[in-house]
């Protein structure tokens, strides 16, 4: 039978820290990442690699909980080793650029997220590691911006329905990509609790009075992301996201996400 001291030790034992593989061809960057995570009880740098092949070999040998992988390294196509790495651990891509092609390709191949150097600190990096091991996506704000811009460009290229001569074109249909938009629309396609197109255009020209951060949050809400997913993408707490959304609802004069999305997407001018 264990004594009281043994029982107390077991009860207060800390969970095992998450073991991370850091892969970057620049030793200065590797040292910087190692320094950011040093001394933390929840995250431990278990191994390092300087190219894609080394990263794959190190992952097979050390079996880390997560991999921090530079998007461009010599020795092998970094994105080419991404899928084999993903069989071993979730991978968070790190880069110095928010080029949309890099972000899209990395996410398309299965990366758990994409962070841009200079846009995260020690606590944010550790939180990102924890999140990807729990299955949550993580993106730098600049990465979110380029993806949102691409979605907007595609939406802008969508043709509108022509009306009889002299009547112009039809108002666009509600955005299908937002899954939580309620079905209770008026005949003009807008939720009953929101004003019509002309009033929304006037409000859109002024940006509804949303701050830059509130506009970023609203763009993410419009993609259908949950508060937790938005918090992970922006590297903030869910409470912070909730506070932003409450202020957004007040400024948009709406009481739910569906109405806010419809007003934001239709009432905001490109």
Image (cartoon, helix red, strand yellow):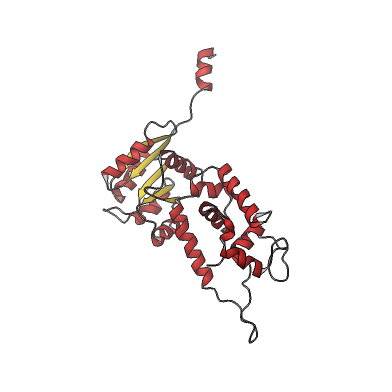
Numbered disc total: 0
List the single residue furthest toward the bottom. Answer: 165
Across and down, in percent, residue 186 comes to 73, 68
Quarter holding residue 47: top left
List the single residue furthest toward the top. Answer: 3
- Residue depicted at 48% across the width and 63% down the height: 149
- Residue depicted at 48% across the width and 43% down the height: 133
- Residue depicted at 56% across the width and 55% down the height: 210
Image quadrant in which the N terminus is located: top right
Q: Which of the pair 177/191 is nearer the observer?
A: 191
Quarter holding residue 268: bottom right
Residue 10, visible in the rendered structure:
yes
Across and down, in percent, residue 32 comes to 32, 40
Across and down, in percent, residue 21 comes to 36, 42
Q: Which of the pair 102/256 is nearer the observer?
A: 256
Across and down, in percent, residue 172 comes to 61, 72
Looking at the image, residue 93 sits to the left or right of residue 26; the answer is right
- Residue depicted at 54% across the width and 57% down the height: 219
Q: Which of the pair 15/206 is nearer the observer?
A: 206
| Above or below for 14 versus 203 | above
| Above or below for 84 versus 130 | below
Residue 136, visible in the rendered structure:
no
């Amino acid at each position: 039978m264990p004594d009281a001291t043994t029982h107390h030790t077991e009860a207060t034992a800390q969970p095992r820290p998450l073991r991370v593989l850091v892969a970057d061809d620049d030793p200065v960057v590797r040292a910087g990442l190692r320094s950011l995570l040093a001394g933390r009880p929840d995250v431990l740098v278990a191994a390092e690699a300087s190219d894609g092949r080394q990263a794959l070999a190190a992952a097979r040998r050390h079996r880390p909980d997560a991999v921090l992988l530079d998007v461009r390294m010599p020795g092998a196509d970094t994105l080419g080793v991404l899928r084999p790495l993903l069989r071993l651990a979730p991978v968070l891509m790190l880069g110095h650029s928010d080029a949309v092609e890099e972000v899209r390709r990395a996410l398309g191949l299965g990366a758990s997220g994409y962070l841009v150097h200079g846009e995260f600190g020690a606590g944010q990096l550790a939180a990102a590691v924890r999140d990807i091991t729990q299955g949550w996506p993580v993106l730098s704000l600049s990465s979110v911006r380029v993806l949102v811009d691409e979605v907007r460009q595609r939406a802008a290229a969508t043709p509108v329905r022509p009306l009889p001569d002299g009547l112009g074109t039809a108002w666009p249909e509600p955005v299908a990509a937002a899954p939580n938009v309620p079905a209770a629309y008026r005949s003009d396609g807008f939720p009953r609790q929101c004003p019509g197109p002309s009033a929304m255009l006037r409000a859109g020209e002024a940006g509804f009075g949303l701050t830059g951060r509130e506009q970023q949050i609203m763009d993410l809400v419009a993609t259908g992301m949950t508060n937790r997913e938005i918090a992970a993408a922006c590297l903030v707490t869910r409470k912070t996201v909730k506070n932003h959304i409450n202020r957004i609802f007040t400024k948009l004069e709406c009481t739910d996400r569906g109405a806010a999305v419809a007003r934001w997407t239709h009432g905001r001018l490109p």
